[in-house]
Image (cartoon, rainbow, N blue to C red):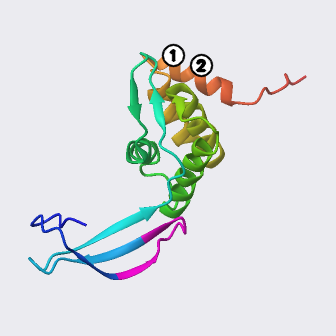
Amino acid sequence: MRCPFCGHLDTQVKDSRPAEDHVSIRRRRFCPACGGRFTTYERVQLRDLVVIKTSGKREDFDRDKLERSIRISMQKRPIEPERIDQMISGIVRRLESMGETDIGSKHIGEIVMEALARIDTVAYVRFASVYKNFQAADDFDKFVQELRPETPPEG
């Protein structure tokens, strides 16, 4: 693996262990050329996924992009990072096991929203505000009203 500091091609693995999510391997590496130390993660990838955007544009699925958007919606929420990692890994496994290599961005968004709804409603609403492209406060209000269970009239 190339050293991110000096570009040397021959780095050495000093330590390998399962990562906290137990679906990846964490490797500590050392560069003999510059002495730099860095960490890499290795994950199983069942198949190469392609995202079909609503515009019809195709792009390779990017786990990091998915993770960034989820972590933004979870910012300052009382959710442990390990739980977020498990959720992201579960979403990726679900996408990879669908049997299709081409997946619509809308379908990915729905799967993410479903997972967020089970973990944290605030993060769910935050993600939905971007995913559903809320334009005004009324959009939030309508969405939140749909989340609230109907209460029977008293009387």
Return the x and y of residue 19 as percentages of the image width and height.
47, 71
- Mark 2 surroundings: few (<14), some (14-19) or many (≥20) residues within 10 A: few
Q: In the rendered image, which quarter contains the N terminus? A: bottom left
State yes or no: residue 18 in magenta: yes
Residue pictured at 50% horizontal, 59% vertical: 44
Return the x and y of residue 12 as percentages of the image width and height.
25, 79
| Quarter occupied by residue 9 | bottom left
Badge 1 is on which residue? 138
Which residue is at the front of the view, 89 or 116? 89
Residue pictured at 38% horizontal, 45% vertical: 68
Return the x and y of residue 111 as percentages of the image width and height.
60, 37
Question: For this view, does 7 lie left or right of residue 19?
Answer: left
Q: Amino acid at mark 1?
A: Asp
Q: In the rendered image, which quarter contains the C terminus? A: top right
Vertical arrangement, residue 8 with respect to residue 44, above or below: below
Vertical arrangement, residue 116 with respect to residue 151, above or below: below
Vertical arrangement, residue 112 with respect to residue 136, above or below: below
Question: For this view, does 98 lie left or right of residue 15?
Answer: right
Q: Which residues are magenta?
A: 15-25
| Quarter occupied by residue 37 | bottom left
Badge 2 is on which residue? 142
Which residue is at the front of the view, 100 or 152? 100
Q: Are marks 2 and 1 in contact (CB under 8 Å)?
A: yes
Question: For this view, does 127 lie left or right of residue 7?
Answer: right
Q: Amino acid at mark 2?
A: Lys
Return the x and y of residue 36 as percentages of the image width and height.
15, 76
Residue pictured at 70% horizontal, 30% vertical: 148
SS of the residue under disc 1: helix
SS of the residue under disc 2: helix
In 3D space, how far apart are the residues under numbered discs 2 and 1 (Cα atoms)?
Answer: 6 Å
Which residue is at the front of the view, 104 or 50? 50
Q: Seen from this angle, which residue lies furthest right?
A: 155
